[in-house]
Image (cartoon, rainbow, N blue to C red):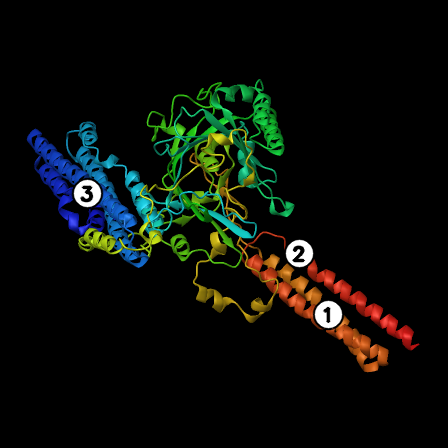
Amino acid sequence: MKFGQQLRDALFTDWKFYYVDYAGLKRFLYERTDKGYTADDEAEFVKLLDSELEKVNNFQQTKSSEMKRRIEYCEKQVDLITQNPAPDDAKREQLDVIEREIDAVISEVYELAKFTRLNFTAFIKIVKKHDKNAPFILKPVFAERLNSRPFFKENFDELLLELSRLYNIVRNGGVDVDGSKDPQSGNGQNFVRQTTKYWVHPDNVMELKLYILKYLPVLIYRTKGATRPPNPAITSIYFDNEALDLYEGRIEKSEGAEAIRLRWYGDMDSSEIFVERKTHHEDWTGEKSVKERFSIKEKHVNDYLAGTYTLDAKIERLREEGKKSEQDLRDMETLSREVLDSVRTKGLGPVVRSFYNRTAFQIPGDARVRISLDTELTMVREDSFDGKPRAGSNWRRTDIGVDYPFSQLPEQDVCRFPYAILEVKLQTQSGVEPPQWVLDLIDSHLVEAVPKFSKFIHGTSVLLEDRVDVLPFWFSQMDRDIRKPPTKGVGVSRANSPRGSFVAIENAARHRAGRVESATPSQSSLQYQNDIEVVVESEPGEHSSQNEGTVTQYPQGYDAAPTEETALLGGRRHGAGDDRAAASWLHRINPFAKPTVPRDQQRQRVTFTSRDGRPDKRIAVPVRVEPKVFFANERTFLSWLNFAIVLGSLALGLLNFGDRTGKIAGAAFTVIAMFVMVYALMLFQWRAERIRRREAGPYDDRVGPTILVVVLISAVVLNFYLKIVSG
């Protein structure tokens, strides 16, 4: 679709006169170039372009200020309601009015973000058309004019935080009841945790954020004493050697494959660096893949990697202070020694840097749903494999910081990922469905599922393509547009502002306050918190300096298994009615038919032609299940039936031709034969379903055969006993 048509389809009708006149500028350009473009035409075109830029910039600034004023007004109304000792029903009614106003503000913030993006794109495209058709070059000059009116640099994150704060307090009936809760609390033992990753197109990022904050507040990690939110940037330096052994192990999912990285949060002046190691374990080992980490001061990193600095002094200091248990200190010492040993024996060095800004959503004290969105993802080369001393002898390169989009770097050294990364982590009790809005979100047009996406693997495979032999499976998704038709009921829709309903709130509040002056002390003293604060917590092991020296060990993907290698919610893409229709009576009575999670990341190698035309690359993609796997399951079922038939034949012989003892034994063996047939059928169905879902093992059953052996021994002993007694 041409951009002109796209602009006409996407513009917000109420603001149509404030968009750039893209069609008019293009028409002027074509008409004048057909007649012979002159210097006077250029001057007139520049004047028109400046006029359009001024119009767009003024409108954007005006609407942005209006949004801030409306949010401030809502905050004042919330304060007024919380200070008023009115009945809860009356407060709830007033808060509902404010919630509708917040919905209206959210819809306009979304439209304003889209307005900004569309107009910026329009200016870039019209200047490109000008330089292509006119005998003058306008791009360098217009870039300066555009920077003087930087409407496209408007940061909507502050508005998002304010809206999140308002939604949080309205959800809780006018008070911030979650402010004192630990965001990591509520993690019990009897929970099923599932994590998966999605790509989000830039056009959908703002809509996705606004949709999520209706249900989850923005989670801000803040160190003690901080007065403003920290820099959301997260930067990691991944280590590997020239043979890319760590990359190969991670993409092949080899047992015990490691990934070692050094990570910091915020700006380059961060003094605390986290040394992290991820270790992959195959399912058949019975162990979970884990991530371990410890912190170290930035000034000691180079000495630590060189083997001239140890953590002995730090561990001893922590032991004297009593901040960490003896087991934690031993784990930290072991991890630091093992990481250093891997670096030295495998010849590891900095290879790839990943940078992104993270927005996290979670209700404090409620770990059932945790969502993070990483935007502006960029991978940068850190290696010196081609002779260029990027990092040199340092553990990271020093010619760049956190200055996205890293325009000072040559293009071959940087990979700007085109999408944002959404990570959804669910923790629900067994048998309990996740919230419906989460199910709607993952099935919506806003996201594209990419299980097991890895920033390290993607950055290495793109920036060092000539050195890798296996490419990740998601490369096949990079060449297609992941945008989809809008899903009804999901996203941000245009809402009408109920500002007329605000008229009586203040007077009604004063009136109710006057009526309750004679109430009981407990009623009249009912006051709610004025200091409304967006959810502010310190995440253990990430932004809090109190975690100095801690070795955090937990399953990859932050939560416990199964992680990104499985599709979220067991691949539920249908409604509950579809699932009930698909469930047979056998599944309902089958003790093996437990809820299962499909394994989407079985590996297979496929040849891939690289940029230089060499068909020497292979892509790790989800593998299809061979028919022989189903046939093997069927042969096992037939073997069980063969055993049951032999046992049943023996039982029939005893029943028909045996004496009293033989008939009793025949009856026992008949019951056992019937049990074996039913057991074999259920086991066959259970295994077939798991194979169809491409699940990982184990596929064996230890209980059934044990019971069968015990019952058979009992039947033989019974037969022997009765024969002895009767003889």
Q: What element carries label 1?
A: helix
Please identify, in this view, whether the residue under mark 1 or under mark 2 is nearer the observer. Answer: 2
Q: Residues within 10 Å of mark 3 (few under 14, many from 20)?
A: few
CA neighbours of label 2 inside 10 A, class few (<14), some (14 to 19), many (20+): few
Provide the secondary structure element on which disc 2 rests.
loop
Which residue matches tag 3?
Answer: 66
In 3D space, how far apart are the residues under numbered discs 1 and 3 (Cα atoms)?
Answer: 78 Å
47 with respect to 525 (left or right): left
Q: Visible in this render: residue 497? A: no
Q: Give the camera-side residue of 183 and 33.
A: 183
Q: Which residue is drawn at 39% across and 21% down?
A: 399
Structural distance between the alpha carbons of marks 1 and 2 = 19 Å
Q: Earlier in the sequence, mark 1 or mark 3?
A: 3
Q: How many marks?
A: 3
Circle 2: residue type: Asp
Q: Residue at x 32, y 27 (%)?
A: 407
Q: Which of the two labelled residues, at mark 1 and mark 2, occupies the earlier sequence position?
A: 1
Q: Looking at the rendering, in which quadrant would you find the C terminus?
A: bottom right
Q: In the picture, residue 375 is in which quadrant?
A: top left
Horizontal and vertical percent position of residue 339: 58, 28
Q: Mark 2 highlights which residue?
A: 700
Which label sits in the foreground, 1 or 3? Answer: 3
Give the residue number, with chain letter if any, for mark 1. 644
Tag of residue 669: none
Left or right: residue 63 compared with residue 520: left
x then y, percent, for residue 661: 85, 78
